[in-house]
Image (cartoon, rainbow, N blue to C red):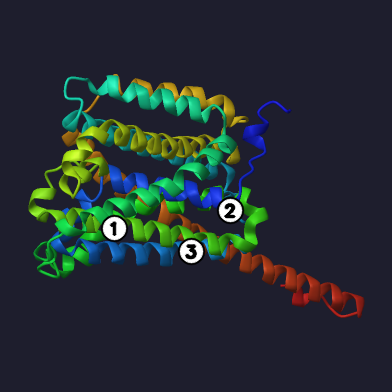
């Protein structure tokens, strides 16, 4: 086997591709949401989630349809649109953005664990388990990560459905009123920042080069992702909002194993807490690993480094160093808000602007080629070449 072949030759099935994206989005909704959505929408959080899902999917469907019909990934389009130096600068920005994303994701879960279960442990003691797992998974590359994701995604959906079924007797219709929650402005305008929750979905725009051979089934894959993801989000939000007034929920931990203490089998769930902690921590390992691999691969694809597999150890060490100087939960919460604002620019605005510029340049190239072709034809017929201009 070739050295680093697991990094260079990335292979996965359609099911595995859907699985990893479902896992990544799900991690956001069990880690730092529904708190953010509930703060904006209140009792109308379900409406707010539906709004975000439809908006994210509309933008995502447009971008993927355009990109996969042309260059198959945003790296190729960028290299044909911008100067090399700009591509390298963006690669570094994108890398730092994903490193921040990983740090905030792990921090959020670690602080939840500290506040609910491991009060005597330090932030670094809890974080080091995540970082070790991050290293063990990423050192094998994308292929092993996709294999694991294929096995774990189905249990995630099953668990959410079972948890929701058990919670039904404890849902109160009163908690869903007033119907418009904190107001129309908060649902449809202030809530827009939470579209950053769908950042993992948009990351496939940068990863699309390796799904070229699956191009015929890509759009159906995205439909599956959207369906599984949206249904899961709605069930989770319904459990949170329906089982307790939103004013109280805002102050609670947002991890889904904490939800199980609110709903039907609350006394039994304490016995299963270690299992739930391990299960959802493992999901966050997979999500963070995928982000780190994409971050390092971006540096190689945009010509900043030659071999991204050698940069993974350095990246893991950098994240470990960040946790040697842990921040408070309040600062991490503020970083979350900054992160989701950045997500809108990096994962939505930048791809749209890039595609727009690419389309303009591409149309000019087509026009030039057309003029050159006509000019050559006229020259062959003995005409003048003024039409070249």
Marks 2/1: CA–CA distance: 25 Å
Q: Are marks 2 and 1 in contact (CB under 8 Å)?
A: no
Q: Nearer the viewer, mark 1 or mark 3?
A: 1
Count of numbered circles in the view: 3
Work out whether residue 204 can be spotted: yes
Q: Secondary structure at mark 1?
A: helix
Say which label, 3 or 2, has the lower sequence index. 2
Q: Residue at x 45, y 61 (%)?
A: 60
Work out whether residue 315 can be spotted: no
Q: Classify 14 as above or below 368.
A: above
Marks 1/3: CA–CA distance: 18 Å
Q: Nearer the viewer, mark 2 or mark 1?
A: 1
Q: Classify 113 as above or below 211.
A: above
Q: Where does label 1 land, which residue?
A: 235
**Residue 185, percent across and down?**
17, 67
Q: Where does label 2 land, which residue?
A: 14
**Residue 7, percent across and down?**
62, 34
Q: Are marks 3 and 2 in contact (CB under 8 Å)?
A: no
**Residue 156, percent across and down?**
39, 47
Q: Badge 3, how many Cα within 10 Å: few under 14, some, many 20+?
A: some
Please indicate whether residue 48 sits to the left or right of residue 312 in the image.
left
Say which label, 1 or 3, has the lower sequence index. 3
Q: Classify 191 as above or below 339.
A: below
Q: Where does label 3 land, which residue?
A: 223
Q: Residue at x 17, y 20 (%)?
A: 120
**Closer to us: 166 or 78:** 166
Please indicate whether residue 127 sits to the left or right of residue 21 in the image.
left
Query: What is the quadrant of the C terminus in the image?
Result: bottom right
Marks 3/2: CA–CA distance: 12 Å
């Amino acid at each position: 086997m070739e050295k680093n072949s697991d990094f260079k030759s990335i292979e996965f099935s359609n099911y595995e591709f859907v699985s990893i994206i479902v896992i990544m989005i799900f991690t956001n909704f069990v880690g730092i949401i529904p708190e953010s959505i509930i703060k904006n929408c209140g009792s109308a959080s379900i409406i707010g989630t539906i709004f975000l899902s439809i908006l994210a999917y509309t933008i995502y469907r447009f971008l993927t349809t355009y990109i996969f019909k042309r260059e198959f990934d945003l790296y190729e389009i960028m290299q044909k649109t911008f100067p090399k130096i700009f591509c390298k600068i963006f690669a570094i920005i994108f890398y730092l953005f994903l490193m921040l994303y990983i740090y905030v994701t792990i921090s959020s879960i670690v602080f939840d664990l500290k506040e609910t279960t491991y009060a005597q442990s330090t932030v670094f003691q809890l974080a080091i388990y995540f970082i070790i797992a991050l290293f063990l998974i990423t050192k094998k590359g994308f292929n092993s990560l996709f294999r694991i994701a294929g096995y774990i995604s189905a249990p995630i959906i099953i668990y959410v459905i079972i948890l929701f079924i058990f919670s039904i007797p404890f849902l109160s219709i009163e908690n869903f009123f007033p119907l418009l929650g904190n107001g129309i402005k908060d649902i449809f305008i202030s809530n827009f920042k939470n579209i950053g929750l769908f950042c993992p979905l948009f990351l496939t725009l940068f990863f699309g080069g390796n799904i070229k051979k699956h191009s015929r089934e890509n759009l159906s894959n995205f439909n599956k992702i959207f369906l599984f993801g949206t249904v899961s989000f709605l069930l989770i939000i319904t459990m949170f909002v329906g089982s307790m007034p939103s004013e109280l929920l805002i102050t609670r931990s947002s991890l889904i194993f904490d939800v199980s203490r609110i709903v039907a089998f609350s006394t039994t769930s304490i016995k299963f807490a270690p299992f739930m902690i391990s299960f959802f921590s493992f999901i966050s390992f997979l999500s963070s690993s995928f982000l780190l691999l994409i971050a390092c691969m971006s540096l190689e694809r945009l010509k900043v480094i030659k071999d991204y597999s050698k940069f993974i150890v350095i990246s893991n060490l950098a994240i470990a160093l960040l946790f040697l100087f842990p921040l408070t939960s309040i600062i991490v919460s503020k970083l979350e808000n900054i992160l989701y604002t950045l997500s809108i620019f990096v994962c939505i605005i930048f791809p749209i602007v890039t595609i727009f510029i690419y389309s303009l340049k591409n149309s000019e190239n087509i026009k030039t080629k057309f003029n050159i072709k006509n000019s050559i034809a006229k020259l062959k017929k003995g005409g003048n070449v003024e039409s070249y201009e």
